[in-house]
Amino acid sequence: MPSPNIRTHKFLHRIPFKFLSLHSFSSLKHANFNHLPPDIQGFLSLLHESPNDLLCIKSIHAQIITNSASKHHFLASNLVKSYSQLGCLGIARKVFDKIPQPKPILCNSMLSGYLRNQCYKEAIELFELMGVSHWGFDSYSCNFVLKACMELEDYERGREVIKRAVDRSVDGDRFLGSTMISFFMKSGDFNGARRVFNRMAERDVVCWNSMIGGYVKGCYYDLAFHLFREMIFCGVRPSAITMVSLVQACGGMKNLERGKCVHGLVLVSGMGTDVLVLTALIDMYSKMGEHERARLVFDIMPAKNLVSWNVIISGYVQNCLVHESFNLFRELVLTGGSFDSGTIISLLQGCAQVADLESGKVLHGYIFRRGLDMNLILCTAMVDLYAKCGALKEATFIFDRMKDRNVITWTAMLVGLAQNGHAEDAIKLFSHMQEEGVAANSTTLVSLVQCCAHLGSLKKGRSVHAQLLRHRYTFDVINLTALIDMYAKCGNINYAERVFKDGSFKDVISWNSMITGYGMHGQGHKALDIYRRMLEEGLKPNQTTFISLLSACSHSGLVEQGRSLFLSMEKDHNIKPTEKHYACYVDLLSRAGHLEEAEALVKQMPYQSSHEVFEALLSGCRMHKNIDIGSKTANYLLSLDATNPGIYIMLSNIYAEARRWDAVDHIRGLMKRQGLKKTPGYSLIEVGNQLHAFFAGEDSHPNSEEIDQILENLKSELEASGYIPDTSCVLRDIDEAMKIKSLWRHSERLAIAFGLLHTPEGSLIRITKNLRVCSDCHTVTKYISMVVKREIIVRDANRFHHFVDGKCSCNDYW
């Protein structure tokens, strides 16, 4: 074959000699360039054989221009292809634009280049230009642009491309037909995909795979198997891709027996060594909890690639075999195998699953030492790990330095804050998330609902509920239960009832939530009523049901009903009482003053009594001023844990109420020597979408002067109405005047005064307090509700108190 008629003296030093050898022209036979002029053939051969090197391509391009061959469509098409393969789309487009009336072959090279470099919008814009300029297009053009539309999920424009292909009668091409099937499947138009498939005159295995794979992705598993049988009947031999789709279908159906059948078919079809198919089988068995079968498939693989290792490691993590997943990772490293961020992500998820912070930190170090790409998914997994392990400083450090964050990243950080007791910070983070324009998902909003419940923030809770409704998220059991819990904990039991009644699907967890809500609000009889309704509807109670019921009876003083429920657990429902049930029962008896019976029950327990049981008994002793049982119980608790400040405080209070100041001083001295401090009392109130915190004795609030004035006025009005201070609540050895002054600096009174100052007259005031309300504050709040004619709801550490017209919903039993 003659060489191109070009000036080679300057060209040869730029192009490696092998490209000018006669051997370089051997490819022309395969490329079918014989109909082209000799000089064009030579340049095409050079481009075809050139290395993946920009300088080399530019040198060939320069000689093409010098020889005035740059206007040739076929040559320009190959230049565009070469530049596109190197990612030089700007140069490729300049080559393209030099041709005044480009033919489809050149347009297709440019479209292919855009697609290869993920410039999908540019591909669509070029196709539009081809139509406007009347350059013409073929099935390949439509194929490239339709793939671009799929990547952008621009289904409307994709349908326009298909219409133009049909109008031009180029839709019969099997490659385009296969892409059209994939397009319709991805857009959810399964009937449209089937129509295209049925019209195809020639259907190869790729077309069948597109249909079967589309059905599997759309969860139409039975249709996928039906089509597979049709494929076999038509004499089309299945490929590895076919088998992968069928294996995935079995995984989606959770049908182990059918999965085993497909596994057998894989072996019979001679694909028992195909890495792709075997990897799909490992994934299927792992997702069905058959990790031993998955490992068996993995072990017999003749060749394992990175994907295979990642799938088996991920499968072990999914089956809670975190230790085994790390053993596999060590095996991978020791055998010299490579790993990527996907491997590490699975291991990080395993660490998060079992709260293994140390192993997580080792992996973090491994990431930096190996220089792995800190991509979005990997960073999100690290944030999730640190957040779930309570290492919020490390989680925040990674989160703040991430360039890109999606809703999953924000949710991981938000959930971490919420679960580690930083509910207010979680709500602030959500506000920042909204400012960044990131749309929340269902998990984010449920976590926020839980934060609002913790803070008692009804306004924010309602706002999140509204977002759930506005975005039409599915109200599954998790969402429903979270909302019931939130409204109950925010003091609006009526809204909790409404959510419960409106729920289309209610399981035992939802019923338990409603029972708990009634219990918190001192509505023990309603809790028992709804329990009876639950039984009538055929639901079986569980352990949590009885914990909620016993707690409800405890808060309402329903001793006999509580006794009956406790005995019915094992007798009627075959539920053996746990330590938690005994703790609730002891609390019920202790609150009601049955301290000797409660003490006897503790001694008869089939378990070694836990802290919770003794703390319930000690609380009852303090309430009923029983020093004898109280001191014994406290001493036993301190022998178990001498670092719990709550026990010292409760014992100190028992002695203080008995005016045993020497014992009080001794207990407080023990605390001081051990460096233990009392948990400070505080109260929260929400005004104008902002939470305000008040600590006992605080006088640093910006509105302190106005608050003091309101409290002074209230004190006068309350005393005129018959209020007499109960100074026995002040458990310090100080004079009477100082005790009264101390009472009026309790945190809930400061919060109520702030609420009166900043909320409309007659509106409801909601307070959340971290400790139990003292008897004098309880009395004062009853009087305030009567004097200012306002409803006041106080949620303390134990329950809710609804104060209206001088009365409390607890009937002075708390």
Image (cartoon, rainbow, N blue to C red):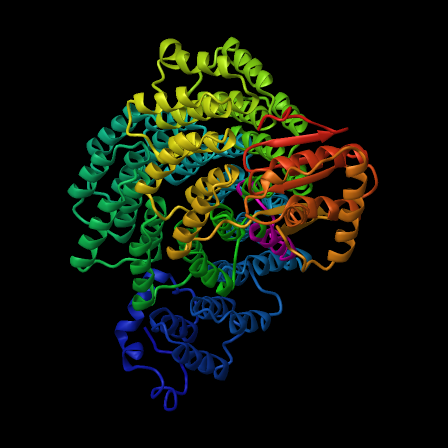
* Nearer to me, 759 or 586: 586
Give me the residue at 21% from left, 34% from top.
293
Residue 339 shows up from this direction:
yes
Q: Residue furthest right?
A: 761
Residue at the image position 29 percent from the left and 67 percent from the top = 26
Query: What is the x, y in percent for residue 73?
Result: 52, 67
Side of 731 where 616 appears, left or right: left
| Residue drawn where x is 27% and y is 39% of the image | 282
Q: Position of residue 632 (x, y in %)?
A: 36, 34
- Give the extent of the magenta segment: 425-443
Q: Is residue 692 above or below residue 531?
A: below
Q: Is residue 580 above or below residue 683?
A: above
What residue occupies the far bottom of the structure in this picture?
A: 9
Q: Quadrant of the C terminus?
A: top right
Q: Is residue 144 magenta?
A: no
Of 498 and 273, which appears nearest the observer? 498
Residue 381, placed above or below residue 455: below
Name the spot of residue 125 as percent of width and height, x first: 62, 59
Pick whichever, 75 or 487, lies toward us. Answer: 487
Q: What number of labels is visible? A: 0
Q: Quadrant of the N terminus?
A: bottom left
How would you classify the magenta stretch by its main secondary structure? helix
Which x, y percent locates residue 756? 78, 44
Residue 441 colored in magenta in the image: yes
Residue drawn at point x = 40 percent, y = 24 percent: 581
Position above or below: 595 against 385: above
Instruction: Place residue 571 in its image quadrant.
Output: top left
Q: Is residue 518 left or right of residue 380?
A: right
Residue 544 visible in the picture: no
Q: Nearer the viewer, residue 625 or 373?
A: 625
